Image (tube, helix red, strand yellow):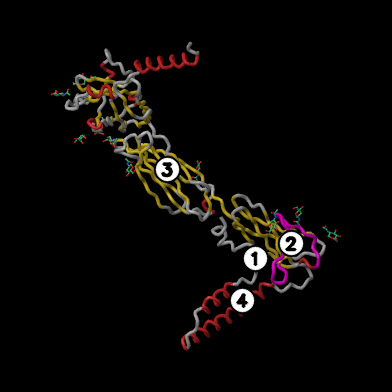
Amino acid sequence: MACPENMFFLIVLFMSGVLACFGQRHLITTMPDRLDVLTGSCVQIPCSFDIPEQHKDKLNSTILTSGVWIKENPYFGGRPDSVIFNSSETVNRYEGKITGNMSQKNCTTVFFNVTTNYTNRYFFRIESQPFLATDTEKSVKIVVWDLPSSPILTVSGEVKEGIPVSLNCSAVTSCPEHPPELTWTLPTQFTHENQLQENPDQTKSVLSTVTFTPSYLHHEKNITCTAVYPVGTSNKTAEHNMMLNVSFSPKNTSASISPADPVLVGSCVNLTCSSTANPPVTNFTWFKISGDKPTQVASGLSYSLNVTVGDGGLYYCEARNSHGCGKSKEVQLAIKGQEEPVNPKVYEIVGKTLGFIFLFSLIVFFAWRRRTSRLPSGFDMTDRSQGQNSPVGTVCSNQATVGRGNQ
Ligand SMILES: *[C@@H]1O[C@H](CO)[C@@H](O)[C@H](O)[C@H]1NC(C)=O
Ligand SMILES: *[C@@H]1O[C@H](CO)[C@@H](O)[C@H](O)[C@H]1NC(C)=O
Ligand SMILES: *[C@@H]1O[C@H](CO)[C@@H](O)[C@H](O)[C@H]1NC(C)=O
Ligand SMILES: *[C@@H]1O[C@H](CO)[C@@H](O)[C@H](O)[C@H]1NC(C)=O
Ligand SMILES: *[C@@H]1O[C@H](CO)[C@@H](O)[C@H](O)[C@H]1NC(C)=O
Ligand SMILES: *[C@@H]1O[C@H](CO)[C@@H](O)[C@H](O)[C@H]1NC(C)=O
Ligand SMILES: *[C@@H]1O[C@H](CO)[C@@H](O)[C@H](O)[C@H]1NC(C)=O
Ligand SMILES: *[C@@H]1O[C@H](CO)[C@@H](O)[C@H](O)[C@H]1NC(C)=O
Ligand SMILES: *[C@@H]1O[C@H](CO)[C@@H](O)[C@H](O)[C@H]1NC(C)=O
Ligand SMILES: *[C@@H]1O[C@H](CO)[C@@H](O)[C@H](O)[C@H]1NC(C)=O
Ligand SMILES: *[C@@H]1O[C@H](CO)[C@@H](O)[C@H](O)[C@H]1NC(C)=O
Ligand SMILES: *[C@@H]1O[C@H](CO)[C@@H](O)[C@H](O)[C@H]1NC(C)=O
């Protein structure tokens, strides 16, 4: 007794056998599903074909095979108009050429001077007496446009200041003999490289890759990739615009004091920090220079204080985001009637100058010593590292160098 599952299996076997018989193709073509073409341009249809094993012997390779293109409906009997190209004819409805080598089963075809009424689907047929076969199951849809579509712009990951970034712009070309020219408009110097590449469906695209190093000055500036398609004696252009979003550490950090004039003890003073950064500043920190060392006194965009006798002096702020930080110049909080405190900067400058003179004398001294008696070479290094020692040990580096080090 056959159980239902086995019966189901038999039915499936039978059905697939029937389908295989009806669906048998004498010709199997491979071509893209769709091609978008510009009016006046040419269209290259990438095409290859194969003949199933059981029909292979019917094709006599010594007989020239002709390729035929049929529009709309593969059954052209009674509608000769639908045969738009026959490689055995010298005059065809569509001006074209089979550029592929048919002996190598390459049926790649080019049609010239495409007009809007070429929009249709097309079937391929081979004729090599007595073997005639049309692939009725595969067609290519050709869609003709008056204007080119915009090229596609892609960016690799996040755009950060100081880190070279690559952008790709790709434009499809239905007519690889006359590919579009891709040009870039960027707010800075750049290098670019163009190449013709093949897509998975064998259509072609022009790819242009541009590399440049963004800076914070390029934030919110436009980038344009323009594709110029040569069509006959004129050009058709399409472009893609993109606004750059450059992430950068805080820039133009400055501290302001209000009121700016000397104030009385007991009055209220506001210190405000400003900075531009992308992403926005997450942390403002205020420092007061006491002695020659900065001391953190507050955090927040503004620092309001009710002035006491000890509050006079120099202040600066630091702005920080995920990319780094920026430091403002110092501002002075002056108290009316109080002796202007000696600017610690003066000490710093005097100290630095003295240090420099000392260092210079040392270098001269050692240079002189070295010339007379050979010294071990380690001295050079110590000299230089001493010269770089910063008198104020700050967490935040200098504005000009911030960013490159913090990514
Ligand atoms: C192929 O065609 C040629 C010329 O018509 C003929 O001489 C030859 O026998 C044919 N070969 C086969 C395998 O049919
Ligand atoms: C293609 O052209 C050849 C030679 O003129 C002709 O014999 C054949 O019938 C044509 N095929 C079609 C589909 O029109
Ligand atoms: C088919 O011919 C075209 C045009 O000559 C050529 O570009 C393409 O590479 C060929 N395809 C194959 C698979 O050889
Ligand atoms: C086409 O391919 C055949 C077989 O590979 C070769 O003999 C012939 O020279 C090729 N024709 C052209 C025009 O390349
Ligand atoms: C058709 O295309 C050919 C080759 O691209 C060109 O020489 C010819 O001028 C075109 N004809 C028309 C009517 O556009
Ligand atoms: C397509 O349209 C052009 C005019 O745009 C006309 O000259 C040509 O005969 C038409 N071709 C077909 C096959 O209808
Ligand atoms: C640009 O295209 C190349 C080649 O296809 C690819 O390797 C690269 O990842 C692409 N870069 C971007 C930013 O899309
Ligand atoms: C078309 O564009 C090319 C550059 O891609 C240029 O050299 C040529 O002068 C342009 N032709 C016309 C008619 O604008
Ligand atoms: C930048 O591109 C946008 C469209 O993406 C446009 O509206 C804007 O005017 C452009 N700005 C500049 C300065 O070119
Ligand atoms: C500042 O502090 C003093 C003493 O604590 C107080 O009397 C005065 O009202 C405060 N002034 C302001 C503007 O808060
Ligand atoms: C300080 O800032 C606060 C709020 O931020 C404001 O109410 C006050 O008027 C400001 N004072 C001065 C002196 O600018
Ligand atoms: C802001 O930065 C300072 C100094 O780096 C740190 O002490 C403070 O905790 C930070 N505040 C916040 C809210 O992250």
Write down the residue under mark 1. 394
- The residue at which mark 4 appears reads as 352
Residue 177 appears at what percent x and percent y? 29, 38
Counting residues from the start of the chain, the first of labels 1 and 4 encountered is 4
Tell me what residue is drawn at x 70 percent, y 64 percent.
315
Give the amino acid type for the residue marked by disc 1 in the picture. Thr
Assign a secondary structure to mark 2. Answer: strand
Q: Is 133 drawn above or below residue 207 in the view shown?
A: above
**Cα distance in 3D space between marks 2 and 1:** 14 Å
Residue nearest the viewer, comparing 65 with 50: 50
Question: Is 398 located above or below residue 137 in the figure?
Answer: below
Residue 121 at least partly seen: yes
Q: What amino acid is labelled 3 in the image?
A: Cys
> Can you identify the residue that label 3 sits on?
169
N-terminal of the pair, mark 2 or mark 4, is 2
Measure the alpha-carbon separation of dots 3 and 4.
Answer: 53 Å
Tell me the element at label 4.
Answer: helix
Q: Is residue 292 magenta?
A: yes
Magenta part, dominant SS: strand
Q: Is residue 43 visible?
A: no
Structural distance between the alpha carbons of marks 3 and 1: 44 Å
Magenta part of the protein: which range? 289-309
Q: Mark 1 packing: few (<14 Cα in 10 Å), some, or many (20+)?
A: few
Q: Residue 297: which numbered mark, if any?
A: 2
Give residue 400's position: percent from left, percent from top: 56, 62
Residue lying at the far front of the rendered structure: 1
